[in-house]
Image (spheres, grey):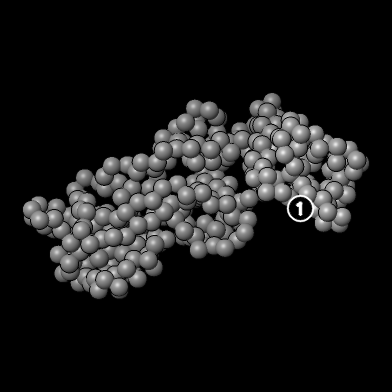
Amino acid sequence: MEMHQVRYFLAASRTLNFTRAAEECHVAQPSLTRAIKLLEAELGGDVFRRERNLTHLTVFGQQMLPLMRQCYEGALAAKKLAASIQKGAVASLTLALSHSVSMALLVSPLRELMRAFPALELRFLRGTPPEIAERLKKGEAAMAIAGPLGETWDRLDAWPLFSEGFDLVVAPSRAPPAAGGAALADFAAERLLTRPYCEVADVWLEFSRQHEIAFGGEHAMVCDADLMQLVGEGLGVAILPKSTPCPEGVLRIAASDLDLKRTLYLYAVAGRERDVQTAALINLLRARAWEPPAP
């Protein structure tokens, strides 16, 4: 399989017109047609169906499209990296994270990435779901990890990484007796430290309304670090994802009536050229057998 065949296939899949695809690739149409025919022979199936003025991808072609795109983008990224290395340039990668995503989740894949690219410089951005979506659109971040963004942009690729439940976190002095377990109702007199920056904040509000869950008031927080400080001092309780590490002096309790879950996703912009470092991290994150850190 030659890269020019893949390039011609991608151009034809975008235009659905062999003449325009040939013009885009600066080749004669017979050359483009011949290259695609050779590609089909190598793949063992037709990728296009041409019916007079109507050209469209076959089912087989639709299945091959994301793989061909990934193959071509990987080749371009490798060429770009090679040129950067030859010039002595330092590569960088910007990753956007939701305020509710723990950096502890990324330590292992980032360590693997840095072993492969020792000169790589990382930049991290934090934001709310709308802010993260906007950073991706503007190209300010190459990729992002967050819960549901509530974004319907058709160029946004979203790969689920893992799903997890939530626990109640309290100060040791507020913990119930060990026997018999605990329920949210046991903490009705406590103030709840809320996380309006979390992607599932609205889901929690609906959950608490449906199950008639009430606390003795609320404190609205702006980050998990401040939240943990107040919980540890006994100034309230909080509901956190299982993957959020708890510091010493804060207890995690599996409440029997807390049936709440979230899914974390890896986001990137489809069709945007990715350098080899970004492609490598995307592959690492998607291939990882995710096990949220133990509390």
**What percent of the width, then of the height, locates residue 16?**
79, 53
Numbered disc 1: secondary structure: strand
Residue 80 in sight: no
Vertical comparison of 292 with 152: above or below: above
Pick the front one: 110 or 70? 70
Quarter assignment of residue 61: top right
Outermost residue, top direction? Answer: 86
**What percent of the width, then of the height, locates residue 142?**
58, 47
Question: How many numbered marks appear?
Answer: 1
Q: Residue at x 47, y 58 (%)?
A: 148
Q: Residues within 10 Å of mark 1 (few under 14, many from 20)?
A: some
Q: Residue at x 20, y 58 (%)?
A: 256
Q: Which residue is mark 1?
A: 56
**What percent of the width, then of the height, locates residue 169?**
23, 55
Q: Residue at x 52, y 46 (%)?
A: 95
Q: Which amino acid, mark 1?
A: His
The quarter of the rendered structure image containing the N terminus is top right
Q: Give left or right: position of 14 versus 102.
A: right
**What percent of the width, then of the height, locates residue 196?**
38, 65
Q: Give left or right: position of 154 versus 40.
A: left
Residue 60 in sight: yes
Pick the front one: 59 or 202? 59
Vertical comparison of 279 with 160: above or below: above
Quarter assignment of residue 38: top right
Q: Give left or right: position of 95 versus 290.
A: right
Q: Residue at x 26, y 44 (%)?
A: 295
Pick the front one: 254 or 98? 254
